[in-house]
Structures are given as C-alpha cells and as structure tokens.
Amino acid sequence: MRLFRQRGRDLAVLSAVALATSLLSGTTAVTAAHAAPTLPAIVPQPVSESAVTGSGFTLAAGTQIDVLSTDTAALGVGTYLAGLLKPATGFTLQVVSSTQPAGNALVLDPNGPATLKAEGYTLTSKSGGVTVTAHGAEGLFRGVQTLRQLLPAAVESPTVKPGPWTVVPVQISDSPRYSYRGAMLDVARRFYPVAQVKRFIDESAAYKINTLHLHLTDDQGWRIAIGALPNLTTVGASTQTGFTGGTSWYYTAAEYQDLVAYAKSRFMTVVPEIDGPGHSGAALASVANLNCNNQTTAPYAGDNWGFSLYCLGDPQHVANVSTFLNTVISTVAALTPGPYIHVGGDEAPATTTAQYAAYVSAAASATTAQGKTLIGWHQLSQGTLPANSLLQYWGTDIDRTSVGAPWESENIQQVRSGVAQGAKFIMSPADHAYLDMQYNSSTPYGLHWAGYVSAQKAYGWDPTTVTAKTDGSSSVVPAAQIAGVEAALWTDNAYSPSSSTPDSGSQFPEPSVYADHMSFPRLPAIAEIGWSPQSTHDWTNFSQRLAAQGPRWTAAGIAFYAAPDITWPSTPGTLNGVHTVTTGGQALDDPASSTTNALQMDTWALHGGNNQKWTFTQQPDGSYTLANGASGLCLDVNGGSTSPAATVIQYTCGGGLNQRWKAVALPGGGYTLASAKSGLLLTTASAADGALVTQQTDTNSALQHWTIT
C-alpha cells in the first residue's frame, strides 16, 4: 500500500521538463500520439475530437436544457448541468423533458445506441445548439464534463462573471478505456468532514473518475459508526495523525449514506475499505477480544506502521476476528449499495502464512455473504480468493526490474498468485499514482519513499506494462485481467514539514488545501490514463491540454500546485503564476531558502533564486495566496494579527484570510499588497539587504509599493 519507511527503496527521479510550447488551435481530429494539440484542450483526451466550422453556440438567460426522456436519472443530469452553469453565468436555465430536440438549446439525449455502452457519448456543438447523446444517464453525465470544458474557464467560478458564454464548435465521440477509474481518499489518518469529501467527489468527477475509494480505518482512526460496536467511534475515532481527543471524527450512518448518495448523483461508486489484519490499531484500541491478551490497546496518533495486528494465533481469536468482520462488513455493506468491499491486506509483516490465510478467509467470507465483490491490496493473494476478486497493485518500477529474475520481488510473486487465481487488477503504482508523494524536494507536504512524482511522472506509465519488465515485455498481469486504475491520496503526512509528526494541529492545512495541492495537476493525469486510448498518450500534447486547466482550477478556487514541468498560461486580468515581488531592486525573499515555519520574511537584492519566486493563486474573493518557490510555504501575517508592525512570515498554506493578499494597482505602476484580514500593507523596513517585512498602515511609502514581474 505505501511502505513509507523503506527509505532504501527510493526511486530515481525523472528530470522535470519545462515546456515552453504555447497552446495551439486547429481543426484536425486528435486520434493518435504526437498529433498537434487542438482547441478545445480537453482532459481526458476524447477518443475522437474535431473542430466544426462556424461560430459556437452562445448561452443566454433563456437557453433551455432539453432532456429527451422522462427518465429521472437523465433529468437529474439536466438539473446538475443547470446548477453547474448558474453561479458563473447567473442564468437559471429551464430543464425540460421532451420527445423532440428544441433549437438553440442544450440537448441531452439518453436514447443513443447500445454500442455507446454505459459511459460512452457523442457531443456536437455548433451555432444552433449543443447535443450530447448517450445510451443512458451515466454517459450523459460524462459528456457534460466535456461540455463544461468547451466553455470559458470562468464558468467554474462560484460568482457571476460577465461572459459571453460561448461553447466551442466541435464534434466528439468518446468512451472509456477502462471501466474502473478510481480516486482513493484516506480519511482514517486525517479526517475529512462530509463537505470536504463532497468537494473531492466533485473535483474528481469533473475528470470522469467513477469510483471513490474511502480508506475508512487504520491505526490512527476508525471513521464509520457501527451500531453494535460503539467503542469503534467513541475510542477508535478519537485520534488522527498528530491529533487526539476527537469526539466527532467519524461518519454517522446517516452522514455516510449522504456521501454515498452524493457520489451516486455524480455517477461515482463508493468503495469502503475496512483494513486488516494490519493497520488495525483503532480497532484494537476499541474491541478487547481482537487482542491476544483480551485487553484494548491505547489509541494511536503517530505515523508509524507495522505494529498492529489482529490476533489470529488460536481458534478462539480467529473466531473473534471473524465475528468482528461479519458485524462490521454486514453493517457497511447495508449502507453501501455499490458492488465492492475493500478489506485491505497490506503491510502485515508479523503474520505467519497460516494467520494471514485465516484473515483472508474470514474477510472473504464476510464479504461474499453480503453479495459483495472482494477488493484487497495485492498482498491478499497470499490467501484463497473468491471468484471475481479485484486486487489493487501498488508496487513500483523497482519491482519491474525483478520480473522473471531468480530474485523476483515479493510484490511480483504475489501478483502472479493473484493472476493464477483469476483476480483482476486495479493499477495504482506508488511511484506514479500515489498522490501523497512529493512533487519534488521543495514541495511542502508528503513523502518520497517511492521517489518524487512530478506531473510528468504521474502521466508517464501504462497499466499494461506496470508489471512488465522494464523493456515492456513479459507483463505479469495479462491485459484482459486489468480492471482499471486508481490514484491514491494518503494523508498520514498531510502536514509541513512532513519529516516528523507534529505535536499539535498547527502544522496541518485544511484537508481540502492538502487534497488540492497533492491532487492537482496529478489526478487528471491518472484520470486520462484510465479513460483515453493508449495511442493518444503523449506528454507534450497532454501537458499543453493540462496547462489549459489551470485557469479553470483558479476560477473554481482549487489551490493547485503550479508544477514546474508544465508551462502554465497566464490568466487575463489576474496575477496567477510565478512572480518576483520587488521594491527598489530589493526582492521579497525567504532567507537562505529556509523551509522553517514561522520564519519572518525579508527583502534582499534581486538575484532570481527560487526563494525570491512566489506563486500567486487567486482565491474566490479575488485576493491571492503567495507560495514561496523554495519552501512551498505561504506568505502569512503572524498569528492573524490585525495590528500594525505584526511580522510577515512564511507558514504552511492553509488558505485563511491571514494568508490572503489583495493586490491593488497603483496609478503610476506597481501594486500595494494588503492583508485580506487586517487591510494593512506589506512593508519592508528599508532598502538594505535583510530588511524585515511587516504589515503597516498605508503611508504611501515607496517601501510599500511593489513591482510584480
């Protein structure tokens, strides 16, 4: 699953490639690698995309969404589309059920041919309207995600923008490569409130992700209420990594059902994971007879692994574990209408072969008794798997070097066992698809035991060769046994610096800040691997299309990482992007490229180093966060003070008002930068090297006037 303590397995990092190619426009269908990118720049790349001559269709207040069906689900897609468009356009578009398409409308037709299957669609946009055709509501929903990318980026804004709202004229035919395209969210190590999980669902669904894997239990927390076992939430949910004493860090049955229903409305299947036999610390702290001494352990809030294990050494305790799993899984299955239950199975180094097999037997029995399909990490193949099981592979390129060798890795041997048992595989290679890996050595969150994972590396793999030799031959998993892909966002080190566990919550950003930073731009890269034909996969083409998503994320308030291996476009009318901030030749500076939280910033003679570069990201209120290029930390008013002379520091990005700055253009050029919380201006003490930076009352001083380049 993550094995983050094996520092010796760090992988070599691919060099980041800075691309200076601008976004191109054209009219040629994109159906093969190395084709020139065309506008619109869609992610994931459709199977077939060609421009249509003439002007596009412009939305107006009276535009109708015409659903050619009385089906509730299809009408629901129409309502979803109207809700998607309203905040930015200000239009309340009428959703109408009809039998004939209207002119000058957004037409959703779920009566397309069966050859489109569940998720395929066609989309035609021209001056007289837009038509999305699918074989059912799910395909319509996927088509709507493409439609939103045919509109200006500002359509993602939560507030009204001026428009015009013209849909690019285009003809698209599209369907997915794999039926399983997942995103995993670890809510066990870091609890995500319901609203923030819904936010992650919406962000993932926009890129045609169709599965939400919730890692609900681990050593650091138990996140779902089980009525027959109340201690699982009163005790097991009282901790998360770096936190203790929680009383509401779990989902009630009603809250969980609300999440499942919300995911369903976005055509996403929820996969609940109940991890075991390792990663079971929260359960062991809650249920005494899961321990060999029949005594509960202390709740755990650290970041270690490999120390917890269900007691499976004697028949009575095997029976205890089996009873526990039956109780838990039957409850979770009743709350989860989807077909899957994930039972973990990774990182249990202390188990014997017999003990591990006993766990697999108990977990499989409890799962199949509920009519669910078993999913587990690839280690689960060490036991006997029921028919139609899915295994999730998280090995790395290091494992590929061992394929076919006498010293073949355990991971590859376990994959072979799974293949022999007829299991299908979800591919989540840690050195490409683990979103908790740092992008590079300067990014603030996460780990790098599987190497640094740049945006290019997140895109640079293929599911059919991820268990093959390094030359692509002799794949251990046949193509027919690959179910799909999944990006995994672990949260055990969702703080900065990530080298040690914090002793308070002060180093943690808001969960959504961590999720945005780690997932964007890499989640869309993995989404494209799961959706688009392999023949279309080309980094140069993709990086240009991905860059075009940046203004959309900015408009939506997604605090993405401006990865340096992508040439991001500037957003007209904004300061989004990487800048130096100077006054009189002195640059706003992170002293000595420090990564220390709460360090006061200074100004220093301009030299162009990363510690003098700041990534501006516009927030929904129009203000900006400024993240330093060397530390990844954000410009912050110490303690959120509203007093003049308060120090301006760098701190873990959390998105609060004390980290937001309003840029006001000056008549003669340049800007003032005012704290969004206090209204006071960013001010340097003098024009000397090392002058300290504070917030001060506006005095019209040159030391408060900044050039942003």
Image (cartoon, grey):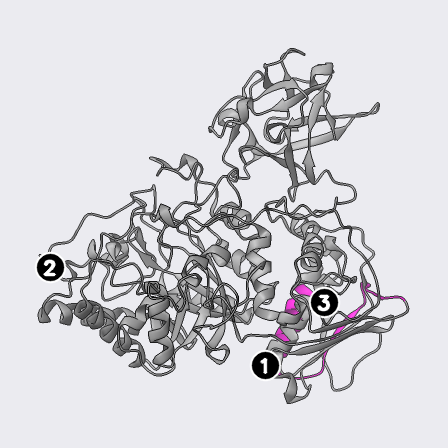
Q: Nearer the viewer, residue 295 or 538?
A: 538
The residue at the point 36 percent across, 47 percent down is 8
Category of crowding for the residue at label 3, using alpha-carbon neighbours closer than 10 angstroms: few (below 14), some (14–19), many (at least 20):
many
Image-quadrant location for residue 204: bottom right
- Label 3 element class: helix
Q: Is residue 46 above or below residue 70?
A: above
Q: Amino acid at mark 3?
A: Leu
Question: In the rendered structure, which disc, 2 or 3, sits on the residue that comes first in sequence?
Answer: 3
Question: In the rendered structure, which disc, 3 or 1, sits on the residue that comes first in sequence?
Answer: 1
Location of the N terminus (image quadrant):
bottom left
Q: Is residue 286 above or below residue 53?
A: above
Q: Amino acid at mark 1?
A: Ala
- Check disc 2 and report the residue beneath it: 292
Q: Magenta residues, as a range? A: 55-83
Q: Position of residue 413 (x, y in %)?
A: 33, 69
Q: Which mark is residue 147?
A: 3
The reply to whether discs 3 and 1 touch (Cβ–Cβ < 8 Å) is: no
The residue at the point 69 percent across, 40 percent down is 577
Residue 64, magenta (yes or no): yes
Q: Position of residue 363 (x, y in %)?
A: 26, 72
- Label 1 element class: loop
Image-quadrant location for residue 407: bottom left
Total number of numbered labels? 3
Q: Is residue 270 toward the left or the right of residue 500 in the image?
A: right
Q: Position of residue 372 (x, y in %)?
A: 36, 79
Name the residue at the bottom extreme: 114
Q: Is residue 621 visible?
A: yes
